[in-house]
Amino acid sequence: MKVESQYTSACPTGEISAYIDAELQPARELEIEAHFAVCELCAEELNLQKQFLCGLDSSMKHEGEIDLPADFARHIVANAESTVAGLRRPRERYNAIFICTAMLLFVLFALGADAGRVFSGVGIAFEQVGAVGGFFARVVYSIFLGFAIIIRSLAAQIQVGDGSLFVAATVVGSVLVMYVSRRVLRTDRA
Ligand SMILES: [Zn+2]
């Protein structure tokens, strides 16, 4: 709050909520009331806190009026269970792994075509270590980027606790990255 610095040492800023809750000694209460009469800042703060409490109060009352279905919680639990169970079925899991692998292969082939074009075009330049290093870094980066996107989209569907799909996807991704790395290095040597 930008007006905070204008409070004086006489301002009972920390006691306003206690005052609203009637937790103060009667003598202190009178002192604070006298202060509210002369201090605009504290009077405003008192109003804000009262308004906030009123809003809180009415929203809580309102919430109590909402009629939840008797089996509301049961429905939620059943929904969550079926979502998790769906992924626990081996068939679903294999489908997910298949999609993941297919997407990774697609990335690989896309990069492969790219790599071939680059190699045939500027083959001589790749004798320079810097160029090879830069290209290699770009390939690895692209693979990881693609992999990260896949993992992220999968993660949205995988429930906490079902880590096996993550492990499988990570293994597939690592193998593909290794494959591409070796391929790039071999092409460089040839
Ligand atoms: Zn004050």
Image (cartoon, rainbow, N blue to C red):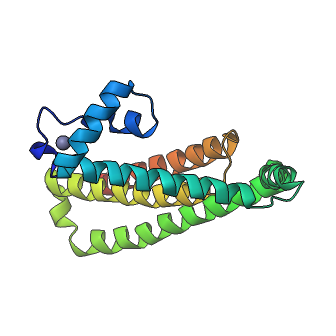
Question: In this image, 145 relative to 131: left or right?
Answer: right
Note whether residue 149 is visible: yes
| Quarter placement of the C terminus | bottom left
Q: Residue at x 76, y 53 (%)?
A: 93
Image position, residue 35 (x, y; %): 21, 40
Q: Which residue is at the front of the view, 75 or 184?
A: 75
Q: Which residue is at the front of the view, 135 or 152?
A: 152
Image position, residue 122 (x, y; %): 20, 71
Q: How many marks?
A: 0
Image position, residue 145 (x, y; %): 41, 58
Q: Farthest residue to the right: give it.
A: 70
Q: Residue at x 17, y 58 (%)?
A: 131
Q: Which residue is at the front of the view, 57 or 123?
A: 57
Q: Residue at x 78, y 50 (%)?
A: 84
Image quadrant of ligand 1? top left
In the image, is residue 119 above or below residue 77? below
Note whether residue 185 is visible: no
Q: Residue at x 47, y 50 (%)?
A: 53
Image position, residue 100 (x, y; %): 62, 59
Q: Which residue is at the front of the view, 71 or 55?
A: 55
